Amino acid sequence: MGERVVVAMSGGVDSSVTAALVLEQGCDAVGVTMQLAGSASRCCSLDDADDARRVAEGLGIRFFVANYADRFREEVIEEFADAYLAGRTPIPCVACNTRFKFHYLLERAGAFGAERVATGHYARIDTDPQTGLRRLRRARHVEKDQSYFLFQLDQEQLARAWFPLGEMSKQEVRERARRLGLATAEKAESQEICFVPEGDYRSVVESIRPEAKAAAGEIVDEAGQVLGRHGGVHHFTVGQRHGLGIGDANRRLYVQRIDAARQRVVVGDVAGLDRREALVEQVCWISGAPPVGAVRARVQVRHRHRGVLAWVEADGDGGARVRVRFEEPVRAVSPGQAAVFYDAERDEAVLGGGWIGETRS
């Protein structure tokens, strides 16, 4: 038997096929399911662990469940709630991937005598022939690409990560699962945040932070005129139009920004959503070091955003804070979301990324 590899098995078809592909490469695969959000979750739940176990048994590999539910609540779910209360729009999948799949699971891999972890992410890793550094690249089939969620991975983690699905389409993955007779071949995948049932993130915030229910405030226009009241800033995100609770037959109003310190939601016309500049904080660079001077990149400000060309330049803090100047206006750039920088020429390689803070029109 060859190299021992831990496979992150979430109970879905992607991780199931990943385990099979690791075996096909002659490796000694060890399946591990990380129980994260409990039985109410749509991902990494007890039911998913059962599905992963069935696949592992069918493939003839060892299987373990690692309970990280308490840590996940503290480091992901509570941070998610606090971000909404601070007027930001969080993206918990980044923290889940970086901290759990590529930090905690890599730690656990050592206990199994494994140096690498294989996951079902649609992304690719290779080595830059000029620098010898690891590169994170988009998946071959961009419609499933998940590199946006992985911008915090460092060189050591990339050296120990394996993405067998990076060259495959979802259809090819399902076809492989069917041929192998895997129990998860037809299992549907959820597009929601795993711990937010039915997409009702407001209820999640209020269950974690009950004081949010009493955090009422004002809805105002750009001039400060009060148009109505709201039941908490966690009900809103930048660019939101529906559910504002204010009626104006002559205007379509959108959330422009959220002033959590004053419990104010500022609304205005759609043109007010356009942004030319953003300050991005806690920036991680895939190479391990920021570029010298300004770099032109394609910047993606949310997962399904097509990305726009922009200039990215350090704004102090040793490259951990940058100013992004978009070459064309970008609509609804939301504080709390990730801004991920891709190579401007080929739009494949991830240069780095960070968290959107202040924005300017």
Image (cartoon, rainbow, N blue to C red):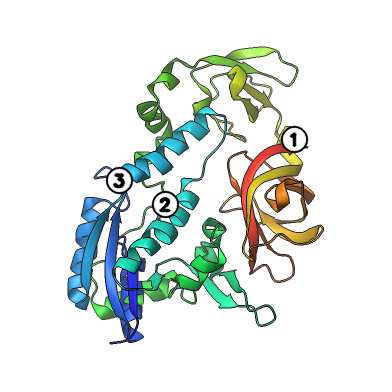
Give the labeled residue for mark 3: 69
Distance of mark 3 from mark 2, alpha carbons?
21 Å
Give the labeled residue for mark 2: 191
Tell me the amino acid under the disc marked 1. Ala
Q: Quadrant of residue 360?
A: top right
Give the labeled residue for mark 1: 271
Can residue 13 be seen here? Answer: no
Q: Quadrant of residue 197?
A: top left
Tell me the amino acid under the disc marked 3. Ala
Residue 61 vs residue 157, the one in the foreground? 157
Crowding near pointer 2: few (<14 within 10 Å), some, many (20+)? few
Tell me the amino acid under the disc marked 2. Gln
Q: Quadrant of the C terminus?
A: top right
Side of 110 where 221 appears, left or right: right
The vertical placement of 130 against 333, above or below, is below
Distance of mark 2 from mark 1, alpha carbons?
29 Å
